[in-house]
Image: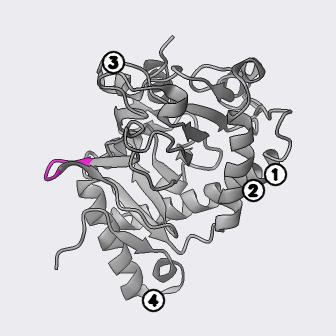
Amino acid sequence: MSEPTIPVVDLAPWLSGGPAARAATARTVDRALRTAGFLLVTGHGVEPALRAAIREEARRFFRLDARTKQPYAVRVGGRGWLGPGAEANAYAEGSAGPPDLKESLSFASHEPTGDPAVDAEWFLPNTWPAEVPGLRPPVEEYLARMRELSDLLLELLGTALGEGEDFFTRHTAHPTWGFNINWYPGRDVVGDPEPGQFRIGPHTDFGTVTVLDRQAGRGGLQVFTDERGWEDAPYDPDALTVNIGDLMSFWTDGRWRPGRHRVLPPPADAPREELMSLVYFYECDPGTDVRGTDSHTYLRAQLDAITTE
């Protein structure tokens, strides 16, 4: 049988296996990133209870009335609340249409580098809503785990590319990153979608790797490949979903394809379906030259492109 387009990759053989097991894992990753740009990974060590705790606390915030949430409102790329209509991911592909049907709590890199200009743009303090004091501890723990996991994945990708393990991580000494808690309410909250409206419109991510913890649903994640078009992404409750972004594709001279994806609108036959995703976007050190592209000039342009205001 042929290997699936989006395979499940157990990280245990990469972490503790011999040379043959590590090489086999790298080959599987290389094949997947040449087609869909997506993987599912198990053996990542991120406990379900931690992810559940974040969702429980974040749901308390999203269920607050709009007036209470408004003081935390920010533009895309900021640190705070992205309210309804704030973002339209399909704009990054040049598509026009309605904004995404979601709300987000957004966090980002915050530990200063010492360069005032860089810090003012990319390393600002995060905002923690006072109404949900229980949110910060699990999020900060999760962010530390995501940083470790992302560097581990980049080491695996460096090997899969035929380079050294530090081929990418030599550029993540003080990287930028973003973390969104995306809330996808049902039609009972947002009403009927407009024509061509999605929870998140079709796009590719902008950075190196994205690590996603998601929930299954009828209005869930779809992935695009040339061979199959749009299809539902495979789901494993024990796995995290990993995809590569534009910078990674640039870095490999197009050998690996950024994972194009979308999140379907809330379904008509399940109007109360509510999903929540934890999305960690990993990037690289400011000033990194990626095959002639200034990484953070590109990132800023893409973030501006999906802002609706």
Residue 58 in percent (x, y) is at 70, 43
Please give the range of residues in magenta: 224-228
Task: Determine whether 136 is above or below 11 in the image.
Answer: above
Residue 82 in percent (x, y) is at 61, 26
Label 4 amino acid? Gly
Q: Is 64 covered by the magenta stretch?
A: no
Tag nearer the camera, 4 or 1? 1
* Residue ID at (43%, 34%): 199
* Residue corresponding to mark 1: 137
* Residue corresponding to mark 4: 18
User: What's the magenta bit mostly, secondary-structure-wise?
Assistant: loop
Q: Secondary structure at mark 4?
A: loop
Residue 68 in percent (x, y) is at 78, 22
Q: Are marks 4 and 1 in contact (CB under 8 Å)?
A: no
How much space separates mark 4 and mark 2, taking CA atoms?
31 Å
* Residue corresponding to mark 2: 141
Q: Quadrant of residue 196?
A: top left
Q: Earlier in the sequence, mark 3 or mark 2?
A: 3
Q: Earlier in the sequence, mark 1 or mark 3?
A: 3
